[in-house]
Amino acid sequence: MSSTVYQTPTTLSPSRISNFRTCPLQFRFASIEKLPQPPQIHLVKGNFVHRVLELLLGNEPEHRTVEAARKAFDETRTEYEPSARFKALGLSPDASEAFFKDSRDLVNGYYRMENPRNAKIIGLELRLDSDFGRFKLGGIIDRLEYNEKNELVVSDYKTGKVPDARFGANKMDNMHIYASLCLRERGELPKRLRLMYLKSSTPIEVEVTAESNSACEAAAIETFEQIDASCQSGQFATKKSGLCNFCAFKQWCPEFGGDDSLAKIEAPNIYPTFERD
Ligand code: SF4
């Protein structure tokens, strides 16, 4: 494995922290070397559905009607179909229709979970950044709201399946980081974190405490220090798991007989970067 020294990133997001914890080498390819990756349909679909729900919930509560949801869906489709990220998927007309049908099913799954008129939204797609000393940590919260008990809640839509316990924990780790950002930047620690799995209409909630928040911040700082150490030494460990089957860099991974030093030369030829919108 190569031992080049890399510049330590000074800004991190919850998902980048999670990526490093999942596999340091994949983090190096994606977030340090910033190598291109093929567009992934589930990510584009997830973005599409997030946008529909953002438009719907951006209306005043009394205007969050089924008609408004249809309008939000159509507007988003008009926005997405000509976009570079959608075109890069190279979908056939049938596959494209399947994409929008799946997306509609996900929006219907949302409706089985809550009546949008009852959501007490404070912010949608809310950007929060905070200074952690040697690095800045920031991210975008899907929803910040009050629940029926007037408790502050961070909610996040998920378009995939409810993960089993082994993978579910790190999704909640990300949410704890968002809670910490809320406390630092808005002065209030959320009481609850909620993942909304649209496909199965399953909400998963956990409580936030001062202790869980301290532990989450300590863990984020520890991960930054591990990233820094990897950048200085050039050593990014591999972590084999079922996720390797979906890793865009598997062919350059030493775990699978690849040469990681070739990724930066070969990946741009195999995965041409498409112009982002
Ligand atoms: S194939 Fe697996 S071990 Fe190798 S870089 Fe990708 S996620 Fe990490």
Image (spheres, rainbow, N blue to C red):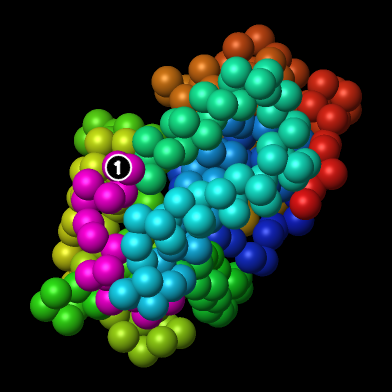
Q: Is residue 10 above or below residue 149?
A: above
Residue name at image x 75 percent, y 32 percent: 88
Would residue 101 be visible to someone looking at this image? yes
Q: Which residue is mark 1?
A: 109
* Residue 255: x %, y % from top left: 58, 16
Q: Amino acid at mark 1?
A: Gly
SS under mark 1: helix
Q: Which residues are magenta?
A: 108-123
Q: Is residue 113 above or below residue 144?
A: above
Say left or right for 242 vs 266: left
In the rendered structure, does residue 61 fall within the stretch colored magenta?
no
Say left or right for 269 vs 218: right
Q: Nearer the viewer, residue 246 or 214?
A: 246
* Residue 158: x %, y % from top left: 38, 45
Q: Is residue 103 above or below residue 175?
A: above
Would residue 222 be visible to someone looking at this image? no
Residue name at image x 34 percent, y 62 percent: 65
* Residue 133: x %, y % from top left: 56, 78
